[in-house]
Image: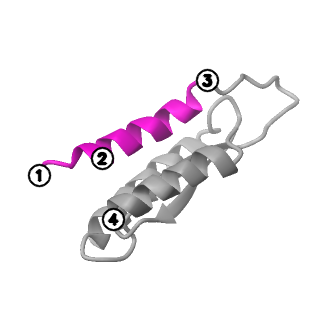
Amino acid sequence: MTRPPLFASIVLILIVLVLPAPAYGPAEKEPIILGQSCALTGPSRYLGIELRSGLLAAFAEANQQGGVNGREIVLLTIDDGYEPYLAIANTRHLIEKTTFS
């Protein structure tokens, strides 16, 4: 199954948002918040639901082992119904209105 280029671009943008995050010292243990726009409704909802479930499972495993340098990983998901215009709006919202750490 091939994924549309827009989907790959959005995933890449969300990953890149985390890379420049500053390192916190041992006293500061704020969670690492990752944003995701995916289809939780609509005809492709099962793709988005499974993608989200996989991420949550991976993050839960990492968090059980102490997270990343003692910081919990948290997933912030916004439904885009697999509509490109909603995916773009959601991604802009995540970038411009959400504080990631």
User: In terms of secondary structure, where does tag 3 sit?
Assistant: loop
| Image: magenta residue range | 1-19
Q: Amino acid at mark 3?
A: Pro
At 78% across and 25% down in the image, what residue appears? 24
Q: In the current view of this chain or complex, which residue is farthest to the bottom?
A: 42
Image mark for residue 20: 3
Q: Name the front one of labels 4 and 1.
A: 4
Q: Name the front one of labels 2 and 3.
A: 2
Above or below for 24 versus 57? above
Residue at label 1? 1
Of 94 and 76, the residue lying toward us: 94
- Give me the C-alpha separation between circle 4 and circle 1: 18 Å
Can you tell which quarter of the image residue 83 is in? bottom left
Above or below for 92 versus 27? below
Above or below for 82 versus 42? above
Residue at label 4? 83
- Give me the C-alpha separation between circle 3 and circle 4: 29 Å
- Give me the C-alpha separation between circle 1 and circle 2: 15 Å
Of 63 and 40, the residue lying toward us: 40
